[in-house]
Image (tube, rainbow, N blue to C red):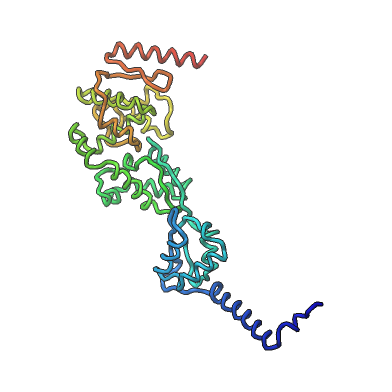
Amino acid sequence: MSLKVSNIFSKLQWAVVTSVFVAIVVIGYITFFTSNHFDKPTPFTFEIKDGESFTSVTERLYEQSIIPSKFNFKVAGFIYGAQSKIKAARYKIPNDISYLDLIDLFVNGPADYLRAIRINDGQTLKWLGAKVRRDLKIDSSAFVNLATDKEFIKSLGLNEPSMEGYLFSKTYKLYENSSPEEAIKIFYNSFKEFFNDSLKQRAKKIGFTVDQVITLASIIKGETDLVEEMPTISGVYHNRLRIGMRLQADPTIQYLLPGGWRRLTYDDLRIESPYNTYKYSGLPPGPINNPGKAAIMAALYPEKNNYLYFVANGKGGHRFSKTYSEHLKNITLYRKWLNEQNK
């Protein structure tokens, strides 16, 4: 025997059921689809941090009066399945946005997403400018110009003509379209954290300023990628500085070349510049790149040796010598290796 639905409920009961259903739909629509107004300049910039939970995001939105109800936002997130889908980014929240539209913004954007960027050991300011443009959508010219702006640099507590050398080598996470000022401050703060009071005391003990340490470290990094060689090369340069011998460091000449690194010519060695360590004694005026931890520690703790010369060995490292005659023999070996490669 089949029963008609009309026989199950009376007309009054049908009216009650229909009313409840309509009420639920209306309340749901009002709750999740109608606009929420906030009294702040719009669009409002809101950052979701790396690894931040949905609950934490909800709490901060409520504390900043962007949403009027934490419960409703959480329910909207549950309906959307957004608890694990929101992305670390910097969002521009328009006013009068519904809960579900806000959830959709956090899941699908648009936004300035959190990106990883690495400053490599020995990376120059110019190359870093190109990297922040590619990875973070930061204007490279604005970045480099600010990093060489004396007033800005002075505001950071530095008395240097450039931030070259002070943008510490490591991996960072920054938001796309961050300002050049924000990015430079983050990079420099990492340098300050690394170069602590203990390292400053060590610099003072060996008779160096912090800038001289970073300058020498940048030359060491320019000479080799082999961490195990860095203290030896540092020892060579410390020896030369101690006796007043010119450093004659090729990386300082490479730094002057507008077209980037290449094999040097004798004409290059005659370039007129205080960075030309073939013409001028002592350290150049400032760092030639942003050295990493290994090169900085090598500059501070040089190997104790009697070497005054070194030349490439053709295998990624160098041959070291105490006398010029030994150095000439090592040069001959290197040239022989070069000739063999060209056959």
Task: Examine the rendered structure and indicate whether residue 116 appears above or below residue 55.
Answer: above
Which residue is farthest right? 1
Residue 340 in picture, x, y percent from top left: 48, 13
Instruction: Name the residue furthest bottom.
Output: 12
- Left or right: 238, with 144 as reference point: left
Which percent across, then down, holds residue 112?
Answer: 48, 55
Residue 18, image x, y percentages: 66, 82
Q: Which residue is drawn at the image coordinates 33% and 40% (left, top)?
A: 164
Question: Residue at coordinates 44% horizontally, 53% vertically from top-left?
Answer: 50
Is residue 128 something that shows in the picture?
A: yes
Whether residue 274 is visible to the viewer of this picture, yes or no, is no
Front residue of 274 and 227: 227
Quarter of the picture containing the N terminus is: bottom right
Labels in figure, total: 0
Quarter of image, res 59? bottom left
Q: Quadrant of residue 332?
A: top left
Q: Nearer the viewer, residue 278 or 324?
A: 324
